[in-house]
Structure formats: structure tokens, C-alpha cells
Amino acid sequence: MQQDEHPAYRPVVFRDRSAGYAFLTRSTASSEQNIDWDDGNSYPVIDVEISAESHPFFTGKARVVDTEGQVAKYERRYGEQGGQDAS
């Protein structure tokens, strides 16, 4: 690996303010803000809008699309003639 061509890969804290959740990982992302972590060290902090703690898919609050209801709605609207060719 050549020196001075790659960004610094160091510990960084990613924080989801909406869920009150933060986790420490390694990244090349940089930030001017720092946070004091549980281990007594200070790390750069990156605020994110959504994480696994607040994403609807991971929290179980995801909206399920009712595809069967959509088909029934289409058939009610257009009847039998909607999907056939007029040849």
C-alpha cells in the first residue's frame, strides 16, 4: 500500500439521534465533532438520519404492501377486458 494516497482508517462513532443509538466502528469518514466513548477515549462522531435501530424494516414497523388487494382492485376497475388483447 502506498503511503499518503489512502484516507486514514480509524475508529469512528456513528450516532442515530432519532433512536438515541450510537456504535463504534472503523471508517475513513471524518468529522470535526468528537464524542467521549465508554472506554474513555475521544472519537470523531458522524450523525446519521437512520440506522438499524430506527429503520422500519429492522424495527418491525415496515408497511407490507397488499399485492392481492391491488390485483382485486385492478379487476374491479377494469374487469376481464383489462388484460386481454383486442385482436
Image (spheres, rainbow, N blue to C red):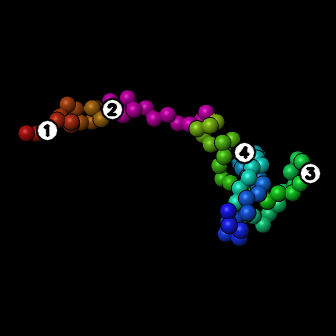
Which residue is outermost to the left? Answer: 87
Dividing the picture into quadrants, the one containing residue 8 is bottom right
Disc nearer the start of the sequence (2/4): 4
Mark 1–mark 3 Cα distance, whole angstroms, equals: 71 Å
Of the 4 image quadrants, the one containing the C terminus is top left
**Label 2 vs label 1, nearer the camera:** 1
Mark 2–mark 1 Cα distance, whole angstroms, equals: 18 Å
**Label 1 vs label 3, nearer the camera:** 3
User: Which residue sits at x=71%, y=68%?
Assistant: 3
Secondary structure at badge 1 equals: loop
The residue pinned by badge 4 equals 19
Magenta includes 21?
Answer: no
User: Could you say which disc has been placed on residue 4 in the image?
Assistant: none
How far from the left and from the top, in percent, is residue 24? 77, 49
The residue pinned by badge 3 equals 40
Disc nearer the start of the sequence (2/1): 2
User: Which residue sits at x=21%, y=37%?
Assistant: 82
How far from the left and from the top, in percent, is residue 59? 64, 36
